[in-house]
Image (cartoon, rainbow, N blue to C red):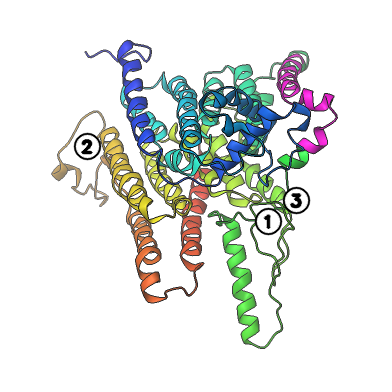
């Protein structure tokens, strides 16, 4: 009998290093590629934290790219700023460094993201060390080689990889029954990036029911310990700003609700349908002679400004989106309260982020990674999970295409990240995990015998398909992705030219929103039936 390889064996560590090494080579090759204004955003944050005392970080308005992340991320930028002047002092110059695009700055920032991804590797390793070798390798493929992370972090430019390392560690500790460590890791994560707070209700309910059980006295004692840990983390993050009397300014920067309902590119969520419905009704009413004024403001705003009005439908406020997120999340919270199962925590966290993505305020398209990364841990649990993840991963990746809009990067998007390597690699991975075998009770039968009708007229006896194969609906939907992309890249410019320039992006948003909405419903159904 072949012994299973130990997750801590030298061979396992070597495999992980190979995964990391291959990913690093690809990331290094992408350094000269397109980058967004986020590169300048983070460079300016380096300059702020390096040039100014802590008491002025959240007040500085030297650039339009003001610091709006929680304090731990500001401390992280401060840490990086110690090394930046060794490469080029202008990187951290508050005034002369504005819009600084020297190769030294680009290479330093790009490589800092690559190095910080080491924490993602650690999080993946801890999360998968108890899995069988094949399942472990598949999760490594889905996370370490995630095309979404490549697009967002190593082309567009951000630091999401190491943040997901914290999230995976938190989920892993909860799944192992180490609730205090899981709660501690999540509290630290929130002090790095507050957008992860959508899952906070799940953590609260789960820890209250799973960790703080055991009677009133014991439960209160454990709740006190857990609360003390969370308070200590937040005190370490926000304490200096409380001391300087700046906590209100920090909160205002972190939650600029004056921004529009949607981001500059409409994230594929529920509000896409709402906006299109509003515009469609307004268009029809104008055709029938009604005087419907066009909204002065847009639905988007990367910078802080006035919230956008609708032409016909009721205006959506941040409080409206908050209530809708909680309502969508409530079945999961109820299920977590009744059955606080460690093995379901990854599903619950992913579902919480799906609710936030669909119904939240000013959601970035990049937030789809909050769904796909945690679900990578679940994708190898069953055949149905693998089919769902395959569809979700493709949709999530495709929804990020508009972030990389320059022509020279198009082959990277289509050939490397989605249409060729990612989709084919996922297909082969899941096919290896669920090979084409027809099984019966305790034995294998031939295809001919398995398809014979029994006495009740059923086409198969006890045999059922257990291999990885998508249904016709999923195949049709994925074919639609090709149609939408073909229209946007080739047919629209040829047939319409400069007319309706918003249409290709709107089609991508709407079509991907259908896929994300399906994923939300599927996840909810899965959470309800599992116990």
Q: Which residue is mark 1?
A: 260
Direction from residue 232 to residue 344 in the image, left or right: left
Label 1 element class: loop
Mark 2 to mark 1: distance in Å?
52 Å
Check the image and report above or below for 409 versus 278.
above
Residue 48 within the segment the image draws in magenta: no
Which numbered disc, 2 or 1, marks the residue that appears first in the sequence?
A: 1
Q: Which residue is mark 2?
A: 437
Percent of width and height locating residue 167? 55, 29
User: Which stretch appears magenta?
Assistant: 221-250
Direction from residue 205 to residue 451 in the image, left or right: left
> What numbered label is drawn on residue 63?
none
Between tags 2 and 1, which lies in front? 1
> What numbered label is drawn on residue 319?
3
Residue name at image x 42 percent, y 76 percent: 496
Label 2 element class: loop
Direction from residue 298 to residue 516 in the image, left or right: left
Percent of width and height locating residue 193? 63, 34
At label 2, counting other C-alpha atoms closer than 10 Å, the crowd grade (few under 14, some 14-19, many 20 or more) is some
Percent of width and height locating residue 487? 38, 66
Residue name at image x 81 percent, y 32 percent: 247
Asked if marks 3 and 1 touch (Cβ < 8 Å), the reply is no
Majority secondary structure in the magenta region:
helix
């Amino acid at each position: 009998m072949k012994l299973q390889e130990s997750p801590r064996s030298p061979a396992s560590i070597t495999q992980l290093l190979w995964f990391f090494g291959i990913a690093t080579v690809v990331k290094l090759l992408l350094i000269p590629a397109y980058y967004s204004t986020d590169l300048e955003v983070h460079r300016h944050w380096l300059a702020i934290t390096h040039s100014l005392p802590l008491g002025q970080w959240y007040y500085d308005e030297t650039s339009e790219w003001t610091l709006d992340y929680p304090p731990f991320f500001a401390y992280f930028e401060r840490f990086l700023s110690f090394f930046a002047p060794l490469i080029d002092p202008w990187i951290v110059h508050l005034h002369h460094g504005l819009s600084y695009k020297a190769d030294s700055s680009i290479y330093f920032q790009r490589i800092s993201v690559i190095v910080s991804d080491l924490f993602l590797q650690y999080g993946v390793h801890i999360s998968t060390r108890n899995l069988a070798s094949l399942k472990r390798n598949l999760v490594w493929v889905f996370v370490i080689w995630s095309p979404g992370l490549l697009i967002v972090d190593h082309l567009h430019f951000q630091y999401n990889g190491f943040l997901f390392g914290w999230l995976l560690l938190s989920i892993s500790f909860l799944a192992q029954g180490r609730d205090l460590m899981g709660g501690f890791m999540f509290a630290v994560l929130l002090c790095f990036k507050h957008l992860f707070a959508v899952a906070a209700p799940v953590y609260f309910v789960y820890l209250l029911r799973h960790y703080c059980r055991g009677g009133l006295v014991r439960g209160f004692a454990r709740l006190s310990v857990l609360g003390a840990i969370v308070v200590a983390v937040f005190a370490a993050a926000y304490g200096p700003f409380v001391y300087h009397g700046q906590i209100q300014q920090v909160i205002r920067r972190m939650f600029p609700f004056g921004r529009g309902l949607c981001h500059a590119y409409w994230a594929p969520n529920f509000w896409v349908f709402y906006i299109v419905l509003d515009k469609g009704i307004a268009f029809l009413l104008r055709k029938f002679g009604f005087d419907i004024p066009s909204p002065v403001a847009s639905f988007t705003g990367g910078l802080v400004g006035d919230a956008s009005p609708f032409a016909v439908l009721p205006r959506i406020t941040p409080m409206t989106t908050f209530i809708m997120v909680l309502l969508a999340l409530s079945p999961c919270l109820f299920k977590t309260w009744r059955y606080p199962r460690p093995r379901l925590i990854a599903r619950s966290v992913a579902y919480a982020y799906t609710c936030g993505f669909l119904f939240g305020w000013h959601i970035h398209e990049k937030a789809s990674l909050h769904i796909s990364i945690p679900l990578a841990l679940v994708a190898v649990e069953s055949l149905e999970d693998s089919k769902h993840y395959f569809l979700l991963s493709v949709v999530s990746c495709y929804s990020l295409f508009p972030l990389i809009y320059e022509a020279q990067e198009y082959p990277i998007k289509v050939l490397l990240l989605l249409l060729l390597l990612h989709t084919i690699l996922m297909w082969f991975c899941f096919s290896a995990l669920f090979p084409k075998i027809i099984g019966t009770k305790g034995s294998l039968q031939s295809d001919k015998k398995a398809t014979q009708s029994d006495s009740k007229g059923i086409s198969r006896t006890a045999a059922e398909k257990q291999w990885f194969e998508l249904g016709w609906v999923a195949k049709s939907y994925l074919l639609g992705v090709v149609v939408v992309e073909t229209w946007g890249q080739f047919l629209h410019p040829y047939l319409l030219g400069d007319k309706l320039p918003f249409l290709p992006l709107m089609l991508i948003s709407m079509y991907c929103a259908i896929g994300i909405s399906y994923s939300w419903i599927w996840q909810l159904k899965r959470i309800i039936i599992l116990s």
